Amino acid sequence: MTGTRVMLGVSGHSHVDPRLAALPERGEGRTAFPAGWALIEHPIHGPILFDCGYGEPARTAMRRGLRRVYRGVLGVCCPAEGDASTLLAQRGIAPGDVRWLVISHFHPDHVGGLRAFPSARFVAHADAWKTMQRGALARLHAQVWRELLPEDFVARLMLLAPDRFTALGGDLAPLGSGVDLFDDGSVVLVDLPGHAHGQIGLATHHDGTRILLVADAFWQHAQLDTPQPLSWLARRLAMHASGDYAATLSRLRQFRDAQPDAWIIASHCARTLERWTHRHPDAVLLASG
């Protein structure tokens, strides 16, 4: 289907020790990572979000307790003028206009702005939701915060059970398994385990060009080109399953090699965002200044 368009947005940044992200090229000091998300403009289903970055609930949470530690360790900056709901207004999209919001996984830099979208139906992998149901200590280790979810979240949640994921065909075949959300090929949710339990990506098109949004399957595009073992720190603090992470990267490389014109967009890759902005200056949502 060729009627969809993609706009990339950024709502906040982190500044992280590069050892934590397993980066092939490691300079001195911390590396800046945008908290990226995407708007898919669908000709039938209207505006669809893939994640939403940080937002007011995340800012509130990070003012107290252990959430302040998270903010300090990751060097989080998320000013209100960069919230997804604010940036969407630049496109003439009100929060209530968003009827579908796909959650790649439940880390705060991906779901921190959920409460701003009162009419959205949330879509997530059932395994990702299980992480949110665990005890307090397990949730702390998994970096998931219940207070970011709207009060009626469960009523609006559509869970994708593992058996919903079936073998993909066509150009998406190298990626393994996925779910065709609308049964028309326009939005396909792809299983991308490794970084987080139940992490999913989203495959669509931008004016006919294949787009693959991969969340945190990797952090910088160089990781696709320069495979290297994860450090102990990355395995301990930033991975649910390092073996699955490596297998997911391998599938993404196969897809890239088979589809060299496709865009593979990780949520935190500043280089990819810059390339996209240069190529599609009318398809970005960024705070001014």
Image (cartoon, rainbow, N blue to C red):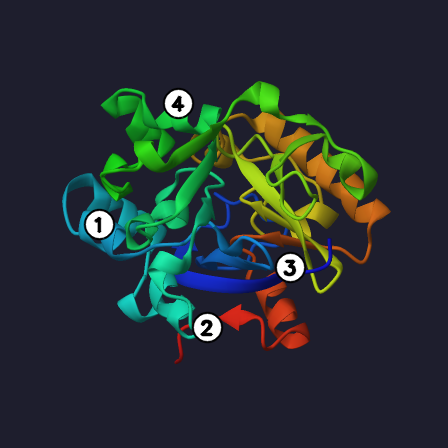
Q: Residues within 10 Å of mark 4 (few under 14, many from 20)?
A: few
Task: State which mark lies toward you, 4 or 3.
Answer: 3
> How far apart are the two marked residues, 1 and 2, measured between alpha carbons?
29 Å
Q: Secondary structure at mark 3?
A: loop
Q: Tell me which amino acid carries mark 3.
A: Thr
Q: Earlier in the sequence, mark 2 or mark 3?
A: 3
> How far apart are the two marked residues, 4 and 3, measured between alpha carbons?
31 Å
**Picture disc at residue 91:** 2
Q: Earlier in the sequence, mark 1 or mark 4?
A: 1
* Residue 235 x %, y %: 50, 31
Could you say which quadrant of the image residue 178 lies in?
top right
Q: Is there CB contact under 8 Å for labels 2 and 4?
A: no
Q: Secondary structure at mark 4?
A: helix
> How far apart are the two marked residues, 1 and 3, measured between alpha carbons?
36 Å
> How far apart are the two marked residues, 2 and 4, measured between alpha carbons?
34 Å
Q: Secondary structure at mark 1?
A: loop
Q: Residues within 10 Å of mark 1 (few under 14, many from 20)?
A: some
Q: What residue would you read off at disc 1?
A: 62
Q: What residue would you read off at disc 4?
A: 130
Q: Tell me which amino acid carries mark 1.
A: Met
Q: Give the residue furthest to the bottom.
A: 289
Q: Earlier in the sequence, mark 1 or mark 3?
A: 3
Q: Tell me which amino acid carries mark 4.
A: Lys
Q: Is there CB contact under 8 Å for labels 2 and 3?
A: no
**Picture disc at residue 208:** none
Give left or right: position of 153 versus 187.
left
